[in-house]
Amino acid sequence: MAWTEKLASGRYRGGYRIPDGAKRYTGDTFVHKTAAQREAARLEAESRDLGWRDPRAAARTWGAWCDEWQKSRLTENSTAAREVGVIEKHVRPKWGEVALIDITRHDVKVWAVELQEAGLAPATVKKLCALLSVSLNGAIDAGILTANPASRLNLGAPDNLIERYLTKKEQRRFLAALPEGSTDRALASVLLGCGLRWGEAVALRRGQLDMKGAKLRVRDSWDTRNRVMKPYPKGKKRRSVPLPTWVADAVKAACPKDPHALLFSVDGEHPIDLSNWRRFVFTPALEKAKIEPFRIHDLRHTYASNLIQAGLPIERVRLLLGHVSIITTQRYAHLGKLDDKEVLEALVDPSRAKKKPKAEKRPGAKRREEVRGAKLGHSSVAIDREPLNTSPSNVIDGPWKSQIRA
């Protein structure tokens, strides 16, 4: 029940309790006790309405909310560790001491511009804003905020999303730079010819190769950061991909026969280390093949570009790559466009378009003659045909069979 208190100034303020029992007071003071009582009663009744949240909850800082929000997140350990690093480096310095209720849409856009001016790539800036937006969505779910000021920001398309991929000649030179029959060449062939992620490739076991069916089953994934084997690939959906003959030959020449053994291992138990393979195998192969530096993951982009340029539907490419969303696969869509020559051939000058020649009459074709019957007073059409052979066999088997049936 609401009450009033007389202050030292002689004015009155109203007091009330919110549903959890905590005390609250009116924001203003009043000359008359009745006015303070009335305002306190109104606020108390409002606090008991369905969906009401304490206005002071949104006054907590983003940093305090972030600590609480991260504890409720159900994410992979590697993803959580990566997010913590990003938050501490880029997000908390800007928003850590800012009250949730004080974060505005304009402020977030200004922050995005500041990040780009500091040298961050547009795609990185977009990811940081998306991370902030997810945290504010969590505040909405918790009933702290009613709107997300960082939602659906129009930051423009990042200009650094163009994927690097090898040409056919570069692919041949790259594989030729690795020793034939070696484990390194087998691994590179799987990355290039099956489009697997690094963690999926080094988690492969011999039993996942179906040589007769020319299939490779993507079942597990190696977590490079935490050094643990996950019983599922990224997206948590297992899949099968076609196994090209040249990839199968490279694998058979270098990998163990034990169906439970890892295909690409240094000691039979632990997968090949990413950093070591990049430093001692991948980079030297690029230098030998005279190829400009690019990432190991770009072998996967090359696989996707090969499929798109060969005419495979983008939905099929999505399934082969193991993408959860078609939006992720759309980055390769531009590779499937027609080349300039095909476009120019399709755009014929209408003023110079050739007219189709008239079809010549075939010998013995039906001829129609219009004859007018003087006595009938109207036009009639007589059809001249070759004499009809009315023998029984011709009537049944010939072109007039349909007429008899009708």
Image (spheres, rainbow, N blue to C red):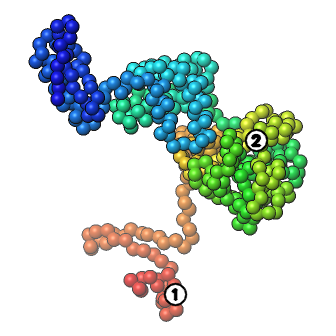
| Residue at the spot 55% in from the left edge and 60% down from the top edge | 359
Residue carrying label 2: 274
| Residue at the spot 62% in from the left edge and 53% down from the top edge | 232
Identify whether 69 is placed above or below 23.
Answer: below
Helix, strand or loop for disc 1? helix
Helix, strand or loop for disc 2? helix
| Residue at the spot 57% in from the left edge and 37% down from the top edge | 80
Q: Nearer the viewer, residue 111 or 221?
A: 221
- Left or right: residue 141 versus residue 165 is left
Q: Sort mark 2 into few (<14), some (14-19) or many (20+) by Cα contacts within 10 Å.
A: some
Label 2 – label 1 distance at C-alpha: 77 Å
Q: Of callouts 2 and 1, which one flags the residue occurring earlier in the amino acid sequence? A: 2
Residue 244 in sight here: no
Q: Amino acid at mark 2?
A: Leu
- Left or right: residue 203 versus residue 146 is right
**Quadrant location of the N terminus?**
top left
Residue carrying label 1: 397
Q: Position of residue 251 (x, y in %)?
A: 80, 56
**Mark 2 against mark 1, which lies toward the viewer?**
2
Q: Nearer the viewer, residue 311 or 126?
A: 126
